[in-house]
Amino acid sequence: MSINPVSSPNQGIYQTQVVAQPTAGQTKPPVSKPPAQEEDTYTPSAASKAAQAALQEATETPAQTAKEARSGDPQAQRLLAKETAAQQVLSPDSK
């Protein structure tokens, strides 16, 4: 028994679709360029920047801290206030 593909309910699977070809008047889609090669550059993370800033604050000289406090740096002002309070506690006679 043979099945006639024309009368078969699955005849759609044997059909092919026609794909439109571009004509001479149509433009071609733009050709994508390969991504530009990026240079290997190090970009520090926020945590790394914070660690660098903490290290710089910890290793700066008292003169630098005083200069920053005079120019309005609140962190330097707090540090000088703590240092001054600590000196007064350790040597109460130096008032």
Image: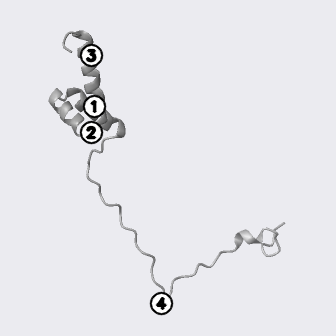
Give the amino acid at mark 2.
Answer: Gly
N-terminal of the pair, mark 3 or mark 2, is 2
What percent of the width, then of the height, locates residue 70? 22, 36
Residue that numbered label 1 is attached to: 77
Task: Determine the secondary structure under disc 4.
Answer: loop
Q: Are marks 1 and 4 in contact (CB under 8 Å)?
A: no
How far apart are labels 3 and 4 at the CA level? 85 Å
Q: Secondary structure at mark 1?
A: helix
Among numbered discs 2 and 4, the one appearing first in the sequence: 4
Q: Residues within 10 Å of mark 4 (few under 14, many from 20)?
A: few
Is residue 65 found left or right of 4 in the rendered image?
A: left
Relative side of 73 to 31, left or right: left
Q: Are marks 2 and 1 in contact (CB under 8 Å)?
A: yes
- Residue 77, position in %: x, y? 28, 31
Q: Which residue is mark 3?
A: 86
The answer for how far apart the CA atoms under marks 3 and 2 are is 21 Å
Q: Nearer the viewer, mark 1 or mark 4?
A: 1
Q: Nearer the viewer, residue 23 or 7?
A: 23
Q: Which sits earlier in the primary sequence, circle 2 or circle 1? A: 2
